[in-house]
């Protein structure tokens, strides 16, 4: 479920658009660039595909998926910074 006044939910609802395409998406998570003016190199947003205000609200499957996404996103950023 999305929440109207939430910035992340506004992007999910298509009211705002993060720069570039979605970098990664699965059943629970999306990886994308941050919205301007917070756009910073070597920095990506990993966000849930539903409104969530606390990690305690994650489902076990969503929490498990997050660990793998964090590792892969950090690996991708480290490989990009080598080039
Ligand atoms: Zn939200």
Image: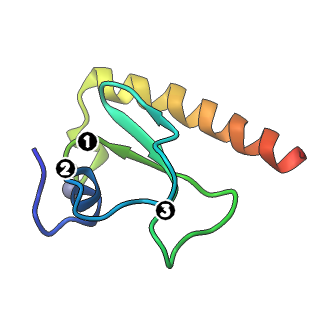
Q: Cα distance, mark 2 to mark 3?
A: 17 Å
Whole-Å distance between the Cαs marked 1 and 2? 13 Å
- Report whether 12 appears left or right of 46: left
- Tell me the quarter of the image containing the N terminus: top left
The residue that disc 2 covers is 51
Q: Which residue is drawn at 53% across and 25% down?
A: 68
Compared with 22, 59 (above or below) is above
Q: How crowded is mark 1: few (under 14 residues within 10 Å), some or many (20 or more)?
A: few
Q: In this view, does 4 lie above or below 54?
A: below
Q: Name the residue under label 1.
A: 56
Q: Where does residue 6 sit, x and y in percent of width and height?
A: 20, 65
Q: Residue 34's mark?
A: 3
| Helix, strand or loop under label 3 | loop
Whether the residue under disc 2 has CB within 8 Å of ligand 1: yes
Inter-mark Cα distance, 3 to 1 = 23 Å
Q: Is residue 54 left or right of residue 65?
A: left
Say which quarter of the image contains residue 59.
top left
Where is residue 47? Give x, y as percent. Answer: 37, 47
Closest to the observer, 14 or 50: 14
Q: Earlier in the sequence, mark 3 or mark 1?
A: 3
From the viewer's side, name the closer residue of 71 and 35: 35
């Amino acid at each position: 479920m999305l929440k109207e006044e939430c910035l992340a939910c506004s992007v999910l609802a298509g009211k705002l658009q993060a720069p570039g395409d979605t970098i990664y998406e699965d059943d629970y998570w999306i990886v994308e660039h941050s919205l301007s003016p917070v756009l910073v190199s070597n920095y990506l947003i990993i966000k849930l595909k539903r409104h969530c205000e606390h990690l305690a609200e994650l489902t076990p499957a969503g929490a498990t998926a997050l660990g793998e996404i964090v590792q892969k996103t950090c690996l991708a950023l480290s490989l990009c910074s080598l080039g």
